[in-house]
Image (spheres, rainbow, N blue to C red):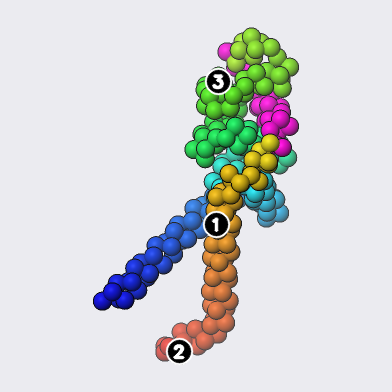
Amino acid sequence: ALAGAAVGAQVGMLRQQAGQIADYVKQLNLAKITLAQASTGQQEYNQQLQIARNISKDYSVGLRETILGYSQVAVAAKANGLTLQQTEKVYRGVIAAGVAFGKSQEDLDAIVTATVQVLSKGKVSAEELQGQIGERLPGAIAKFAQATDRSLPELAKALQGGQVSIADFVKFTEKQVNDYDEIARIIGASPEKAAERADNQREFEEKQKASAARAADLEQRRKDAPKRAQENKAGTQLD
């Protein structure tokens, strides 16, 4: 009875793990679909996917969360006519700063959401800069003023008048990369980030397993196609 219970528990754990892998793959694929919408073709899609993977690896942040966040930023950036290089700077800038300040994944997600809102509006408002971004990134407002050659009073006036552009926001994020990329990489490689690196590696391996399983299934379907065609013709199953 005890042996049977142990086997049952192991089966239950395997089923749970399989369910988690399936859920991970599903969410990852949804993020990739969003990323495809921001791409002009297969080549650009591959480039953008690699950018997201690099950022995840450089700063030891979640792969799934990074692809999802980057894909949302990429869609909004495309609507503003930003280049691939500018889009990477925008996303890398806000994530690098967040990691440098030791922010949680929840904080990083909130910063990304604010970034998407800025890009979707087509201008920078006080709500995002002073609120969602400024509250999570110390000194962000002062750095924004520096990046756009404004004093703090001048920036406040420009925000009030709706005169802070997406080009200004790109300058700000480029400064964030310059100021925080190195320290974010150091933190990403630190022992404190070992768990995140292990999670990313596990997620990558799970994705590889899922991809291999799909490839094997497609190959089997290809091999079975002639036989299935005969089955359909004869009305019998040939297995």
Query: In the figure, 157 relative to 218: above or below?
Result: above
Q: Please give left or right for residue 101 compared with residue 6 in the image.
A: right
Q: Are marks 2 and 1 in contact (CB under 8 Å)?
A: no
Nearest the eye: 145 or 13: 13
Camera-side mark, 2 or 3: 3
Magenta span: chief secondary structure = helix
Instruction: Say how many tags the image has.
Output: 3
Dot 2: element:
loop
- The residue wearing badge 1 is 203
Query: Identity of the amino acid at label 3?
Result: Gln
Which numbered dot is residue 65? none
Decide: is 48 above or below 202. above
Q: Residues within 10 Å of mark 2 (few under 14, many from 20)?
A: few
The residue that appears at 44% across and 59% down in the rendered structure is: 20
Magenta residues (range)? 160-182
Near mark 3 (Cα within 10 A), the count class, few <14, some 14-19 or many ≥20, is: some
Please name the residue that numbered disc 3 is placed on: 130
Q: Amino acid at mark 2?
A: Asp
